[in-house]
Amino acid sequence: MKNVVVYTSDSCTYCTLTKNYLRSKGIHFEIRNIKEPIYRRELMRMRLRGVPVIKVDDAVIVGFDRYAIDEALR
């Protein structure tokens, strides 16, 4: 099973779409809300600022991209 983490924010529509998409596929994932300073710093260390960011093992996907998510989950 792959390790899936979603960096998100409360006001992000694409974050909601991402989480709903993963749930619809039965994928278990960890949510990291960037309102928490520790998770915001993690994104900054990756040199990323926008959400959603989806990590599937070592793959990093920026934005809601069904194709990229599906490819990373294979």
Image (cartoon, rainbow, N blue to C red):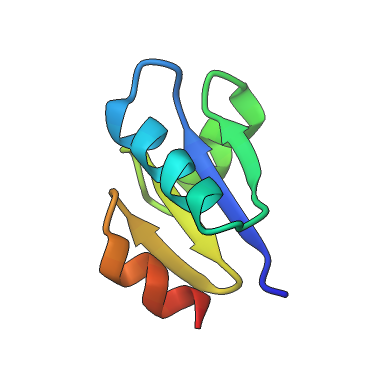
Front-lying residue, 25 or 41: 25
The vertical placement of 27 against 51, above or below, is below
Left-right relation of 15 to 23: left
View extreme (right): residue: 1
Q: Residue 21: image x %, image y %? A: 42, 49
Question: Where's the N terminus, which quadrant?
Answer: bottom right
Query: Residue at coordinates 45% horizontally, 40% vertically from top-left?
Result: 20
Q: Quadrant of residue 12?
A: top left
Query: Which residue is nearer to you in this view: 68 or 60?
Result: 68
Determine whether 65 is above or below 44 in the image.
below
Question: x, y (%) of residue 51?
Answer: 36, 38
Determine whether 70 is above or below 40 in the image. Answer: below
The foreground one among 59 and 19 is: 19
Image coordinates of residue 29 in percent, x first then y, are 65, 50
Q: Position of residue 14 (x, y in %)?
A: 29, 35
Q: What residue do we see at 27% from left, 58% from top? A: 65
Q: Residue at x 38, y 41 (%)?
A: 52
State the count of labels: 0
Left or right: 49 in relation to 2:
left
